[in-house]
Image (cartoon, helix red, strand yellow):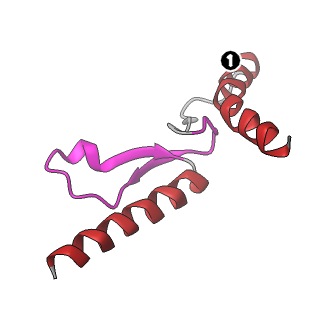
Amino acid sequence: MDIFKQQLQKDMAPHMARALRDIQGYPEGTQECERCGALTACRRRQRTLYEDEESNWATLCPACQKEADAYWDERWAEYYGMIL
């Protein structure tokens, strides 16, 4: 039951963050995480090398950025492991 509850909380987080922001009126410039909806996000450079520079950036909170960094580190290790 704990896994279900944790997943439900994770799924509801973006909706709850938006509702709180709408009700409470957060200051101008507050950014919402693209993944979880947390209001501690900022625009961050990703560990990607897309030709379209805009695709190398995302608005993420620190926790989601840590997950993204780990994901891209793994992808790059896999890539370099295949070509070396």
Asked where in the image residue 21 lies, by quadrant, the reply is top right
Callout 1 crowding tier (Cα within 10 Å): few <14, some 14–19, many ≥20: few
Q: Which quadrant is home to the N terminus? A: top right
Name the residue rendered at 16%, 83% in the picture: 84
Name the residue rendered at 47%, 65% in the picture: 70
Viewer-proximal residue among 4 and 40: 4
Amino acid at the residue labelled 1: Asp
Viewer-proximal residue among 19 and 14: 14
Asked where in the image residue 13 lies, by quadrant, the reply is top right
Determine whether, in the image, residue 8 is placed left or right of residue 58: right
Determine whether, in the image, residue 5 is placed left or right of residue 56: right
Residue lying at the far top of the rendered structure = 23
Q: Mark 1 points at which residue?
A: 22
Q: What stretch is highlighted in magenta?
A: 36-60
Determine whether, in the image, residue 43 is placed left or right of residue 75: right
In the picture shown, does residue 51 fall above or below 49? above
Determine whether, in the image, residue 30 is placed left or right of residue 24: left
Query: x, y (%) of residue 83?
Result: 15, 76
Query: x, y (%) of residue 75?
Result: 33, 64
In the picture shown, does residue 65 fall above or below 27? below
Number of numbered labels in the structure image: 1
In the picture shown, does residue 66 fall above or below 21? below
Q: In the image, is residue 59 part of the stretch drawn in magenta? A: yes
Residue lying at the far right of the rendered structure = 1
Name the residue rendered at 34%, 48% in the picture: 57
Residue lying at the far bottom of the rendered structure = 84
Please, what secondary structure does the residue beneath circle 1 have? helix
Query: x, y (%) of residue 60?
Result: 51, 46
Viewer-proximal residue among 84 and 38: 84
Query: x, y (%) of residue 11?
Result: 66, 32
Q: In the image, is residue 54 part of the stretch drawn in magenta? A: yes
Viewer-proximal residue among 28 and 52: 52
